[in-house]
Every structure is written in structure tokens, then in C-alpha cells.
Amino acid sequence: MSHHARRSIPADQTLRQRVAAISDKLIASGMRYDAAPLFPRESVDTIVAAGLHKTFAPGASGGQPFDDALSENAALLDVLRGIGRADLSLGRLFEGHVNALKLFAWYGGPDQRAWLGQRLDEGQLFGVWATEPPPGVTLVAGDGGTHLQGNKSFASGAGGLGHAVVTARMADGRTQLAVAPADDPARADLTGWRVRGMRATVSGSYDLSGLPCTAMNLLGQPDDYGTEPRFTAGAWRFTAVHLGGIEALLAETRRGLSEAARSDPLQRLKFGQAVVAARTAYLWVREAAQRAAIDSPDAPAFAQMTRGVVERAGLDVMELAARMIGTRSAFDGQRIDKIIRDLSLYLRQAGPDFARDQAALAWLDRDVWGDGDELW
Ligand SMILES: Cc1cc2nc3c(=O)[nH]c(=O)nc-3n(C[C@H](O)[C@H](O)[C@H](O)COP(=O)(O)OP(=O)(O)OC[C@H]3O[C@@H](n4cnc5c(N)ncnc54)[C@H](O)[C@@H]3O)c2cc1C
């Protein structure tokens, strides 16, 4: 691994301050959208007004210039965890948006990046929709040109986002990325999105059938989407949002701890364990972000191990918080209750055991953390 990854990265204080400045507003609107699950327009508007939806866009689309990829990921880590601390649903939407910006940066042509810049100027948020019920979404060539056919499921922001980058299967079985409008409420079906947490992500299904695909809508070449190491390593971004939720839960627990609990060594022991879990998660996410920034071949295994570490930390802090705070942690309208409900669903990312097993396989081969100080 390059020596760059060891450099200590100065945090982008101004960006951190911009997130901190809107945090209370996001917490308040997040609580409201949790109670009445709708696309969180007001929260998204707050992000857009702060300009954060453009920060990580390609330069040609109006993104902020960073010195290098390491500084960019350090800044992105701060923003993802900062928004996640305020509201995990909004963090999920923002993480999907950043994923879409990355796909434009990696696979978009100059016209497409310019087009993206115009949409961002209009305040649009993007998403990435890959999950689908069978038979999935296909690209169909017809007399009037090519169009999309089929539905996406777990489509965060269905009917509320401006556009989504979607995966579509071609006739030869390969996967093509296509950019589709995502803002038609008539195509969104939210009736099945009746969930314990993450309600404001409105991750319902979305019918893409009949939407035209011209050269302008097709992003990159077939099978670009799964290109490694960036595809698997990119999981670090959602672990950063999870981390924000864990940190917010820890902060709320500290705030809510009764005097009786504070003066009890058994409760303090739990608090100490929760601090270690949250900070351990942070250390792994920070490392994973750095390795992803330099496209290290180890970045995928690192991100996969990080997913397991963050999942474990989240589960532990949820249990510890409930035991420290008691029944108050489960009451409607309590922030601890919302964070626990959101986190318990959001931690269910696809194939968690598979990810851990892949990481273990890589570590069996060599010490992936290593960096000149390998254990074997
Ligand atoms: C809030 C939220 C928002 C989301 N937003 C989006 C989005 O915008 N775009 C998008 O594309 N997706 C999105 N997703 C979907 C997400 O990426 C995953 O596809 C989804 O969470 C997987 O759900 P599942 O647990 O039902 O998975 P499943 O794959 O059905 O797995 C269920 C369980 O079965 C077991 N299992 C499954 N497959 C295997 C296997 N091969 N080997 C061993 N065990 C297995 C595992 O124990 C697993 O936990 C979102 C999910 C959530 C929760």
C-alpha cells in the first residue's frame, strides 16, 4: 500500500461546520418525516441550500475541488457521518446520491457530466437502484429506439428523487447503467414500505417500463458497474452513515443517562463498552475510506471486514443503550427509539455473512491491515 495512506489527513473544518450548522434542522425534520413517512423534501432542501449535494460531484458538474482523493474521502466521511448522526434516512438518501455522483465521475462522458451539473443546479438529488424483483429490469430495443422494461425494489427516494442511475440487463446478459427520471409518483409504489425504521427513505418499488434510453441516458460500458476494487470498496460509504447513527445513539444515551445510572459502576461499564464500540467502528471506517481513496487492491476486503465491525458495533450499542436507558429508549417520539429503529433496519445490508467470509478469506491469505507491519 502506498505511504500516502498513513498520512494524517486534516479534516475539512469548513465542510464539517456546514454540516454542523444544519444538523438541528435535519434532526427536527427527520423526526417529523419518521412520523409521517413521505419523501423528506424539507430535509433534502436543507442539504441543497447548504450546497452539500454538489460538493462531491465531478469538477465538470460543479463539484468542489479537493487536493487529492484522500482529502476528498476524509471530507466525505465527515459529511456522511454528520448527516447520519442527524437522520439515518436522510443519510441513506445522501449516500445513494454520492454513489450516483461517483458513477458519473467514473463512467460519464463530458456531455453527461455537464447535464448532471445542470440538474444539480436545479437542486435535484440522485439515487442508485440496483435491487429488483424477478424478472428484473431489461433494456429493450424496439422500433422507436431503446427503452427500459421492469421494476426496481428497495428504490430509495422512489417518486421523490430527480433521477436514478439504474442497472438494466441487456439481451446478451450483461449489465448496463442507465439514467432514468425518478420523480413520477405514479410510477412509485410505496404501499409495501411499511417498516420499523428508515421510513423516510421511501424505498418502495418503481416502474421504469417504457422510459426511453438514448446514448445520453446510458452511463459507461456494459458491466462497468461491478468494476473492482471500487464496487466492493465503495461499501465504506454506507458504513460511514451507519457510524453516524451509532455515534448519535451514544451521544443521546449519555445525555439520557439518569443520575442513578451514572453513579453505578455496572452502568458505567456499559457506557465504556459503548464508547469503545463506536470509536472502533470509526477507526475501521477511516481506514476503509483511505484505502478506497487510493484504489488499493486490498480496499474491497477491508471494506467487507469493516461492514462486519460496524454491524457488530451497531448491535452492541443498541443493546447497551437499551439497558442503560431502560424503557424510555422504546417510547414514541424519543430520539433514541428512532435511531434504534432506523439502525436496526439499515444494518441489514445485502449479504453480511458473505462479506465477512470474503474478508476472512483475504486475511487468511495475507494480513490485509498490514501496511509494512504484517502479522504474517
Ligand atoms: C433502507 C434501505 C434502503 C435501500 N435502498 C436501496 C437502493 O436505493 N437501491 C438499491 O439497489 N438497494 C437498496 N436497498 C437494498 C439493499 O441494498 C439490499 O438489497 C437489501 O437490504 C437486502 O435485503 P435482504 O436482507 O432482504 O436480502 P436478501 O438477499 O433477501 O437476504 C436475506 C438473508 O438471507 C440470507 N442470504 C441471502 N443470500 C444469501 C447467500 N447468497 N448466501 C447465504 N445467505 C444468504 C442472509 O442471511 C440474508 O441476511 C435498500 C435497503 C434498505 C434496508
Image (cartoon, helix red, strand yellow):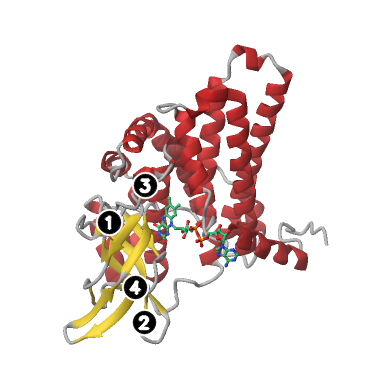
Is there a contact, CB below 8 Å, between mark 4 and mark 1?
no
Read off the residue under disc 4: 137
Name the one closer to the observer, 369 or 359. 359
Read off the residue under disc 2: 170
Identify which amino acid the numbered label 2 is placed on.
Answer: Met
Question: For the point 35% across and 50% down, which residue is it?
Answer: 193
Q: Is residue 178 above or below residue 192?
A: below
Question: For the point 29% across and 61% down, which residue is it?
Answer: 206
Cα separation, mark 4 vs mark 2, equals: 9 Å
- Image disc number at residue 194: 3
Read off the residue under disc 1: 189
Residue 178, position as x, y percentages in the image? 32, 71
Name the one closer to the observer, 314 or 51. 314
Q: Is residue 13 above or below residue 311?
A: above
- Secondary element under disc 2, as helix, strand or loop, is loop
Cα separation, mark 3 vs mark 4, equals: 24 Å
